[in-house]
Image (spheres, rainbow, N blue to C red):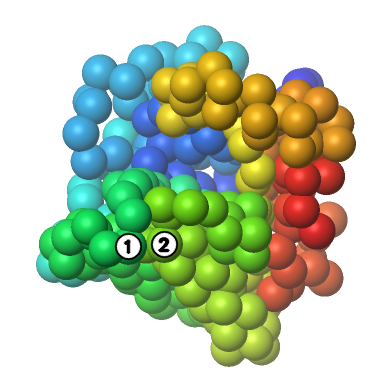
Amino acid sequence: MSAGNRPLAEQVALVTGGSRGIGRAVARELAHRGAHVAINYRTGEEAARACLTEIESDGGTGELCPFDVGAADAVGPAIGALAKARGRLDILVNNAGITIDGLLLRYREEDWQRTLEVNLGGAFRCSRAAARFMTRKQYGRIVNLSSVVATMGTTGQAAYAATKAGLEGMTKALARELASRQVTVNAVAPGFIDTEMTAGLPEELRAMYLAMIPLGRLGTADEVATAVAFLCAPEASYVTGHVLAVNGGLHT
């Protein structure tokens, strides 16, 4: 992409869980479009640095921004320091998430709480911290990474599905709340995407999922990243409170 065709030039973006999978693809895509990207991670500094190297090799800029989105006392100071150092924060992509699978009758309370703290609580805290800066500037883009399971459901993922459904509800509420300050809030809900998480699926389960997808294949992280980038673009200024499905026709 040429220097004259970088729609996010001079903008600052924060991608939580940006060191691998969909988050990594999103970080690279936003940087490719001109944004300075802060790559958040909790563990896996090596993967985060590798992502930053890829961004810089493509002519982009970025930095590492380590903190645990599930830690209430860590989010505000980390995002505040980023925004103050850069003088702005234009884009927040709430991608960080975990899945601790298990059937209802055996599910542990601590796993339920941790899933909620990271997937839903983390997005809430990051959005609250980022919105303080975005509303002052009268501009911002918040994109939450949901999942097809928010509306479709999956056996053994009650906690994960609950957090993603909650995330979509929060997206719609915050879109109304922040619209008057020209801050849009949207979500992208991927289906089955070819990442490290799905790579470990048993072959028979993978075949079953493929049979359910009208397009007949798993999606790619880059395809999800392109959808996220669209919602972050100036051209998406009239799109807010929307959940964009990227699932190959699996569920509508």
Q: Quadrant of residue 188?
A: bottom right
Q: Residue at x 45, y 68 (%)?
A: 162
Residue position marked by numbered label 2 in the rendering: 158
Q: Which one is closest to the eye, mark 1 or mark 2? A: 1
- Percent x, y of residue 231: 72, 55
Q: Is residue 249 left or right of residue 114?
A: right
Q: Is residue 202 above or below residue 225?
A: above
Nearest the viewer among 234 and 186 is: 186
Image quadrant occupied by the C terminus: bottom right
Q: Quadrant of residue 200?
A: top left
Q: Is residue 47 left or right of residue 137?
A: left
- Percent x, y of residue 211: 76, 30
Does the rendering let one see residue 34? no
Res. 25 mark: none
Upstream in sequence: badge 1 or badge 2: 1
Kind of residue at disc 2 = Ala
Q: Is residue 221 above or below residue 224?
A: above
Q: Secondary structure at mark 2?
A: helix
Q: Residue at x 48, y 15 (%)?
A: 54
User: Label 1, label 2: how many angstroms apart (C-alpha)?
Assistant: 7 Å
Q: Residue at x 57, y 22 (%)?
A: 204
Q: Residue at x 57, y 78 (%)?
A: 169
Q: Secondary structure at mark 1?
A: helix
Residue position marked by numbered label 1 in the rendering: 104
Q: Quadrant of residue 129?
A: bottom left
Kind of residue at disc 1 = Leu
- Percent x, y of residue 40: 33, 42
Within 10 Å of the Cα at label 2, are there few (<14), some (14-19), or many (20+) other Cα atoms? many
